[in-house]
Image (spheres, coloured by chain):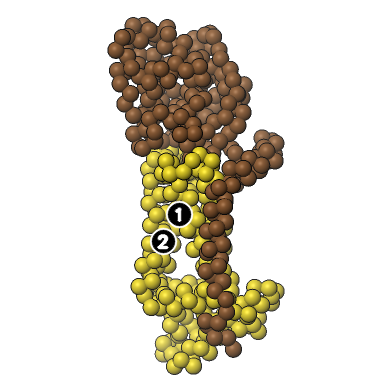
Amino acid sequence: MTAPLDGAPVGRRVVLGLLGLGAVGVVTGSRVQEGLSRALAPIQLRDPTGLTSAIPVGDTWRYYSVTGPVEPRDASTYALDVSGLVDRPATYSLADLEGLPQTAFSDTFHCVTGWKVEDVPWSGVRVADLLESAAPTGDALGVRFRSFDGTYTVNMTLEQARADDVLVVLTMYGEPVTHDHGGPVRIYSGSMYGYKSNKWLSEIEVTSDNEPGYWEDRGYPLDGYIGE
Amino acid sequence: MSEARDLHRFARAERWVHRSVALLMGVCIVTAAILYNGSLMLAVGHRDAVETIHLWCGLALPVPMLLGAASAAYRADLRRLNRFSRDDRRWLRSRTRRDGIIPVGKFNAGQKLNAWLVAGSTGVLLGTGILLEWTGLVRLSWRAGATFVHDWFALGLGLLVVGHVVYAYRDPEARRGMRTGRVRRTWAEVEHGAWVEEADEAR
């Protein structure tokens, strides 16, 4: 016959053990994750079922959307406006953008919450080139990237937007940008966290200020440089 | 008449804690699925709203567990859950654990283990969730670690909850115990024999 309160306090040990494991995981998890990713990347890339993306096994894309379902835009009718405080506002079709000088590089996509995807091949038109053709006026200070989901915006200073690694992206992984990744055309800003890289780009507006964009307005840093 | 054949199992406060935690946990799981799964996310969207609901339900999750401590019955059951006797260890290792030979008290060893795994995982998810929400708290590599931990513990806790629901689904009398606070004596004699003896002695 066992009295109810005999025995070791295993419950308390289980809780403390889990909390300790969690703390160790926070400190070492990014290295463990890298190891797992290296081991599992070949499997994930060739997994036709998509099941491996349902479990948190490695560094994989996580798809975000801040509005309801976003209506896909057709590549043939796509249009990008460059507007605001510029001498020469312009509207580019996808073919127009493809006709401009292309910049390509591979870079790691970092989310501010800590997940990342390494060695993503990006290519497209430098935002600097589009700004150059548009000729911002003397009182222009910032740019605002808008998305055709109708809600998402990103702010940058004019100087930040002119950096070499800020692209109007036309292809990812050598293919046209898919709808889920923000196609047909998205922004990629290599030095900044993912929230600074709009999906579903529809407009680049040159502004007289650097008013916070969507996530910046919800507390994320205005500049969003990786590592800060 | 059925009163005599019933045993009192859970106090009102305990049932309230259970119901509140179940509701919050359910909302956390549904919103987590939307936040985590790409197809669900793109179909539902509204990341900010889903995230806010997930965050607040997650922060609220330990509240009923802590408020329960105001009830003596809840505290007494926590003490029972905490202690693992030699019989509990034997029960966990046994392949014939359900045959009633190894004495089982108010909670069997599996229920005890589940309770603490859920409590500990909830604590870990709470801590890592806070690091993910307030991104200025720790540096990027720790945030990456927090994402890693939050993902795996969420998966583990999800499986514990699924297991818990499956066991509950299979046992209507156990569900009645949590719904009304009372269970049939005949059920308790099979599932928790040592507890019935203990209740009779206390009488």
- Rendering quarter of residue A61: top right
The secondary structure type at the circle numbered 1 is helix
Residue identified by numbered label 1:
B126
Tell me whether marks 2 and 1 sit on the same chain: yes
Q: Measure the alpha-carbon separation of dots 2 and 1.
A: 9 Å
In which quadrant will I find the C terminus of chain B? bottom left
- Rendering quarter of residue B179: bottom left
Residue A36's x, y, as percent?
66, 43
B70 relative to A145, above or below: below
Residue kind at label 2, given as amino acid type: Pro
Residue kind at label 1, given as amino acid type: Leu
Residues under numbered marks 2 and 1 in contact, where contact means CB atoms less than 8 Å apart: yes
Residue A215's x, y, as percent?
38, 34
The secondary structure type at the circle numbered 2 is helix
The residue shown at (37%, 51%) is B56
The residue shown at (53%, 89%) is B197
Instruction: Between residue A222 and residue A228, name the one nearer to us.
Output: A228
Q: Is residue A40 left or right of residue B15?
A: right
The chain ID associated with circle 1 is B
The answer to whether residue B128 is visible is yes
Mark 1 neighbour density, 10 Å: few (under 14) some (14–19) many (20 or more): some
B161 relative to B14, above or below: above
Tell how many labels: 2
Q: On residue B62, which mark appears? A: 2
Which chain does yellow denote in the image?
A: B
In which quadrant will I find the N terminus of chain B? bottom left
The residue shown at (46%, 53%) is B127
Which chain does brown denote in the image?
A: A
- Rendering quarter of residue B164: bottom right
Residue B194's x, y, as percent?
56, 86
Mark 2 neighbour density, 10 Å: few (under 14) some (14–19) many (20 or more): some
